[in-house]
Image (cartoon, grey):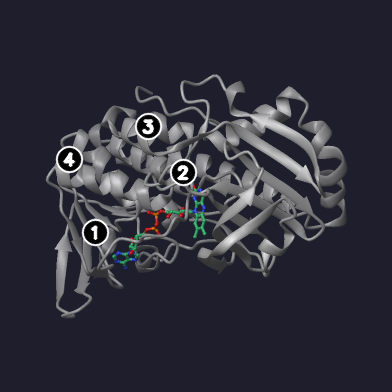
């Protein structure tokens, strides 16, 4: 039964990756999205080694590598001092780097792959509250004509993002918490001596600043580097002592950070993946990457007619990662006097310990858990 065509709700990176992985197993999915056009926002900037590894069999890793920029490590600053460095070269992996690439470009590569494989993305089709979704009956409404139709599928990938209607339709709770204070990002060209081959984290009294090049793959030689400047407080650009903004922000956004995980990864024939299943801070650069791994696991299980194993295989992994990132984020933003003390005075020393460095590297790279074995 699982071999028949699934319906994928959402053509973000996770829905697209699910369609792409499934098609490699001879399973042609139907994929719908409510948007008229794809999003062009840079959002997730890092494709991690685990994602590069998972996409390798599809041939897409080479395409991403040709467009992205290899980030070789992270430098941690406090005031004008460098207090610690971690290097991805210490990872024993064939992709020992984080690939800087705008989410918009990653999604374009995935869309082009589906187009080449003859899988259309059906746009302007919105999943609305569907009481029989768990039985594979999805109510879709055309966003312009408001025409309704019932799509039936033997199983459904709910990749409809943080505010998932699929999740609400099957009454799955999404426990967790949301920080009160908004985080703010600017994508902006900077005149700076900061090494563009590294991520930079700067601890300040109010929290932290994070800086990473925004790479679209369409940069002209000699163009100033566009950086993502992210802070867990308003006006992060005011905290840049080592860089001067050139011109206006290309994208400025403020958003609230949540750490949440669905209480279960599937209800009946509806399987959650990506932001519909889990949310966490961008510390660790895992959001999109973790979702793509959900999609890969689903496709591998579908191939083996073993979708019933998804909850057991995936919930503990996603849970451990959401919890670990919540802890890291608490320290990074120095949310209590104790955590600020640890962050400012103890963490730089701890990062010299191989075990601590490895934990951090394995979290950011997505290599903090083994991939499932399929024969048990
Ligand atoms: C500012 C910012 C920075 C980020 N930085 C990082 C980072 O550094 N690293 C990282 O890994 N992640 C990062 N993320 C998170 C990353 O962007 C998300 O984890 C990722 O987009 C999740 O992909 P998704 O496909 O699950 O959901 P989405 O990208 O949200 O896609 C969901 C899709 O479903 C469609 N949809 C929604 N509802 C319906 C419906 N009812 N019917 C039909 N279609 C529907 C939407 O139109 C959309 O196309 C960041 C996010 C933000 C906002």
Q: Is residue 176 visible?
A: no
Q: Are the residues flagged by discs 2 and 1 in contact, CB closer than 8 Å?
A: no
Question: Percent from the top left, x then y, of residue 184?
Answer: 61, 64
Tell me: is circle 4 under 8 Å from ligand 1. no
Q: Nearer the viewer, mark 4 or mark 1?
A: 4
| Quarter of the C terminus within the rendering | top left
Q: Earlier in the sequence, mark 4 or mark 1?
A: 4
Q: CA distance from mark 4 to mark 1?
A: 19 Å
Q: Is residue 2 visible?
A: yes
Q: Earlier in the sequence, mark 2 or mark 4?
A: 4
Task: Provide the residue designation for mark 1.
Answer: 135
Task: Describe the element under mark 4 as helix, strand or loop.
Answer: loop
Q: Earlier in the sequence, mark 3 or mark 2?
A: 3
Task: Provide the residue designation for mark 3.
Answer: 54
> What residue is shown at x 35% (from left), y 25% (from top)?
374
Q: Earlier in the sequence, mark 1 or mark 3?
A: 3
Q: CA distance from mark 4 to mark 3?
A: 18 Å
Q: Nearer the viewer, residue 149 or 342?
A: 342
Q: Is residue 288 left or right of residue 13?
A: right
Question: Percent from the top left, x then y, of residue 239?
Answer: 73, 60
Task: Provide the residue designation for mark 2.
Answer: 290
Question: Percent from the top left, x then y, of residue 79?
Answer: 82, 49
Task: Describe the element under mark 2 as helix, strand or loop.
Answer: helix
Q: Nearer the viewer, mark 4 or mark 3?
A: 3
> What residue is shown at x 56% (from left), y 53% (from top)?
228
Task: Provide the residue designation for mark 4.
Answer: 27
Q: Earlier in the sequence, mark 2 or mark 1?
A: 1
- For label 4, the crowd category at 10 Å Cα-Cα, with few meaning under 14, some 14 to 19 and many 20 or more, is some
Q: CA distance from mark 2 to mark 4?
A: 22 Å
């Amino acid at each position: 039964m699982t071999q028949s065509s699934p319906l994928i709700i959402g053509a973000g990176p996770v829905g697209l990756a699910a369609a792409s992985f499934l098609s490699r197993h001879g399973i042609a999915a139907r994929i719908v999205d409510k948007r008229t056009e794809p999003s062009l926002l840079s959002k997730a900037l890092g494709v991690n080694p685990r994602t590069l590894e998972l996409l390798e069999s599809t041939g897409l890793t080479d395409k991403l590598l040709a467009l992205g920029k290899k980030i070789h490590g992270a430098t941690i600053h406090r005031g004008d001092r460098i207090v610690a460095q971690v290097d991805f070269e210490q990872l024993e992996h064939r992709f020992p780097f984080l690939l800087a690439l705008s989410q918009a470009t990653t999604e374009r590569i995935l869309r082009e792959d589906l187009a080449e494989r003859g899988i259309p993305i059906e746009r302007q089709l919105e999943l609305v509250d569907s009481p029989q979704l768990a039985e594979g009956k999805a109510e879709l409404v055309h966003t312009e004509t408001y025409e309704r139709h019932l799509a039936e599928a033997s199983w459904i990938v709910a990749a409809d993002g943080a505010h998932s209607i699929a999740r609400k339709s099957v009454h799955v709770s999404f426990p967790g918490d949301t920080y009160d204070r908004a985080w703010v990002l600017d994508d902006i060209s900077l005149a700076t001596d900061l090494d563009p081959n590294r991520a930079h984290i700067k601890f300040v009294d109010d929290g932290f600043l994070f800086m990473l090049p925004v790479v679209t793959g369409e940069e002209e030689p000699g163009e100033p580097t566009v950086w993502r400047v992210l802070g867990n407080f308003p006006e992060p650009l005011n905290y840049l002592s080592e860089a001067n903004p050139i011109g206006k922000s290309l994208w400025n956004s403020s958003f609230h950070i949540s750490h949440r995980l669905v209480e279960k990864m599937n209800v009946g024939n509806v399987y959650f993946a990506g932001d519909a299943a889990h949310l966490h801070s961008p510390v660790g650069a895992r959001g999109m990457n973790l979702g793509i791994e959900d999609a890969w696991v689903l496709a591998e299980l579908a191939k083996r007619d073993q979708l019933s194993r998804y909850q057991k295989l995936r919930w503990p992994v996603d849970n451990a990662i959401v919890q670990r990132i919540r802890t890291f984020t608490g320290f990074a933003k120095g949310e209590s006097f104790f955590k600020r003390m640890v962050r400012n005075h103890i963490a730089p020393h701890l990062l010299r310990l191989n075990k601590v460095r490895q934990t951090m590297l394995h979290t950011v790279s997505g290599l903090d858990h083994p991939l499932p074995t399929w024969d048990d």
